[in-house]
Image (cartoon, rainbow, N blue to C red):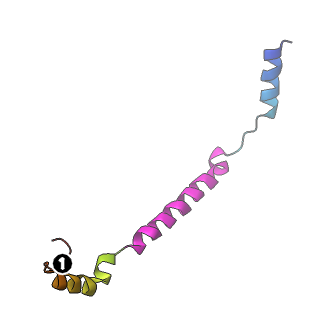
Amino acid sequence: MNFVAQVAVLAAETEHHGNVALETLIFGVIAAIGFAALGLVTLSYKNVANRHAAKAEAWAARNGHEAGHGH
């Protein structure tokens, strides 16, 4: 038996037939957790411009600009 045949026999013996989708499920779980974390970071910036509207209007009044958010 030559080397290539021995490698093929060893590969066939060590091969297992499991559920590949179940074995790789952890990658999907990690990705979902990562996207959820990024979504929470994005959500934390919601309405940030309006939180300081009074400061923006006071600054605009002091400096002679029109108040607003660039509209």
Vertical comparison of 4 with 67: above or below? above
Vertical comparison of 28 with 57: above or below? above
Q: Quadrant of residue 59?
A: bottom left
Going by the numbered disc 1, the residue's amino acid type is Gly
Vertical comparison of 26 with 13: above or below? below
Residue 30 or residue 24, whichever sits in front:
30
Vertical comparison of 9 with 50: above or below? above
Magenta region: which residues? Answer: 20-45
Residue 41 or residue 5, whichever sits in front:
41
Residue 47 visible in this rendered orientation of the protein: no
The quadrant of the image that shows the C terminus is bottom left
The quadrant of the image that shows the N terminus is top right
Which residue is disc 1 drawn over? 68
Considering every residue shown, the one lying at the far top of the view is 2
Residue at image point 25% right, 87% down: 54
Residue 15 visible in this rendered orientation of the protein: yes
